[in-house]
Image (cartoon, rainbow, N blue to C red):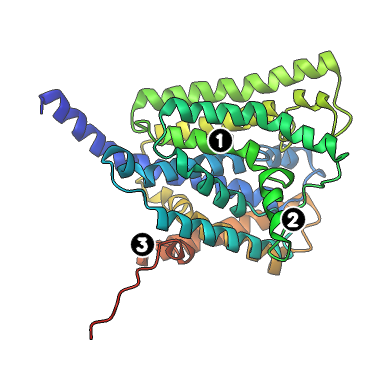
Amino acid sequence: MSTEGTAAARSASHLAPRRMLALDAARGLAVIGMIAINTGPRGDDELLDLLYRVPYGRASLLFVLLGGIGLSLMTRRSRTDQAPLPWAALIWRCALLMLGGLALQSLDHGVSVILQIYALLILCSLPLLRASGRSLLAVAGLSAVVGPPLWLLVQAQTDGQFDRDPVSATEPIWEIFTDIVITGPYPMIIWAAPFVLGLWLGRQQLGLTRLSTRLILWGAVAAIGARLLSAALVQLFGEPTSHVEWQRLVSAVAHSQMPLWLISGTGSAVFVLGVCLKIPAWTRPWAGPLISLGQMALTAYIGHLLVLAFVIRPGPETMAQGALATGATVAGLMAFTWLWRRRFSRGPFEVLLRLPKFRRSAP
């Protein structure tokens, strides 16, 4: 190996731990954003409402983007070393996330659980794990361009009858499938775009300074540019007045499932990822609670649903109460995950995602 190659290898090995901590920090921020959005409420205080809207329609996209990156890193050896894909482990993970998400949806927390779409995205991405980078970008772009019009077409054909309410485990299998794919709060035909983009990003050298700079720049351009384009189109064609009109394609309203919102929200997620990759201080003690929260994101996500269902609901009634409930929930989960990680390498629910190893006992 040449001197330059040796230096590059050493640099990559040095950057790898910091890169992983940056991903954990970004995942922790996504969890905090989803907790704030899910706890609510919003609207009675302009400043708090403005702060509330920052993660609205963005935190969940960041969570899904990081999910794609995580799956890409998890299956790296299958691409680089031609090792067999961990089919059994991935299908086990999909099954647990699907069943767990459907079960959690039946609780009285008032949240659209995201774990089901996450499970189906992993399952449907299995054929893409060895696809070329260009193919991944093509699939992500196709989802962003074709998904929203297809979603609108189904709305128009059914006269807007599907209400986007999430389904639970008690629903028929066909309704569960159609809800996750197109009629639910996270339609896979649209949300595949950030996930597959994450698969592509997971193949890049995330530890490189120039890449994090590009992520920040391009993420900011997409986030701001799509919003400005939407505002200009709304001024030109008017504000959409119906859920089934094609005029909605110009909207950038959060969770509208429209392309400009998807581009803007995904751009925000890429921007946050770039900023986290740029920060060198994630090994400092003060970052420990956020890192632990990201490393135990599944446990924290399930934990906040349980807190909402059994402690907070039916409140909060004001923005101040919502901010207090959010702060207390985040602080409690940070403390729990930090203390847990000091003793155990994996969270209580993260352990379940590992495929059990059944061994025959010796006679």
Q: Residue at x 74, y 65 (%)?
A: 108
Q: Quadrant of residue 233?
A: top right
Q: Secondary structure at mark 3?
A: loop
Q: Nearer the viewer, mark 2 or mark 3?
A: 3
Residue beneath label 3, please? 345
Quadrant position of the C terminus in the picture: bottom left
Q: Quadrant of residue 113?
A: bottom right
Counting residues from the N terminus, which is met first, the one under dot 2 or under dot 3?
Answer: 2
- 359 left or right, relative to 331: left
On the image, the x and y values in percent for residue 131 come to 42, 33
The amino acid type, in three-letter code, at marker 1 is: Pro
* Neighbour tally class for label 3: few under 14, some 14-19, many 20 plus, Cα within 10 Å: few
Q: Quadrant of residue 146?
A: top right
On the image, the x and y values in percent for residue 9 come to 20, 33
Image: 147 above or below 48: above
Residue beneath label 1, please? 194
Q: State how far apart marks 3 and 1 are (Cα).
A: 29 Å
Q: Nearer the viewer, mark 1 or mark 2?
A: 1
Q: State how far apart marks 1 and 2 are (Cα).
A: 33 Å
- 130 left or right, relative to 361: right
Q: Nearer the viewer, mark 3 or mark 1?
A: 1
* Neighbour tally class for label 2: few under 14, some 14-19, many 20 plus, Cα within 10 Å: some
Q: Secondary structure at mark 2?
A: helix
Q: Residue at x 71, y 65 (%)?
A: 106
Q: Residue at x 59, y 63 (%)?
A: 100
The amino acid type, in three-letter code, at marker 3 is: Ser
The amino acid type, in three-letter code, at marker 2 is: Gln
